[in-house]
Image: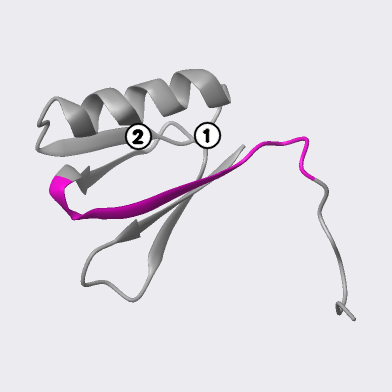
Amino acid sequence: MEIRIGVVDSPKEITLEVKEGVDELVKRINDALSEGTTVLWLQDEKERKVGIPAGKVAYVEIDPESAPRSVGFKR
């Protein structure tokens, strides 16, 4: 599943492919942001860890694997 995280004061978003399920990922992110954690750590499919300052998270977008992918131009 693909996850995109927007970071405050950064024009780029962080995009990761993760193995976790949607529900457990949402719970982990909610817990980290609500508990005052300083760094949100996520691990991608290649076992790389990415740390994001929790106070700088602008948004989180999760695309489950079941979402249809479109190719080409939309009309």
What span is colored magenta in the figure? Answer: 55-67
Q: Residue at x 22, y 28 (%)?
A: 32
User: 57 above or below 29?
Assistant: below
- Quadrant of image for the N terminus: top right
Could you say whether the residue bearing mark 2 is in a helix, strand or loop?
strand
How many numbered discs? 2
Tell which of 2 and 29 is nearer to you: 29
- Quadrant of image for the C terminus: bottom right
Could you say whether the residue bearing mark 1 is in a helix, strand or loop?
loop
Tell which of 23 and 51 is nearer to you: 23
Residue 13 visible in image: yes
The x and y percentages for residue 5 are 39, 52
The x and y percentages for residue 45 are 53, 33
User: 55 above or below 41?
Assistant: below
Q: CA distance from mark 1 to mark 2?
A: 8 Å
- Marks 1/2 in contact by CB < 8 Å: the verdict is yes
Say whether residue 45 is left or right of residue 60. right
The x and y percentages for residue 33 are 21, 34
Is 45 contained in the magenta span?
no
Question: Which mark, by number, is residue 18?
Answer: 1
* Residue type, numbered disc 1: Val
Say whether residue 51 is left or right of residue 67. left
* Residue type, numbered disc 2: Leu
Q: Residue at x 45, y 26 (%)?
A: 25
Q: What residue is pinned by disc 2? A: 42
Q: Residue at x 27, y 72 (%)?
A: 10
User: 73 above or below 68?
Assistant: below
Residue 20 visible in image: no
Residue 35: quarter of image: top left
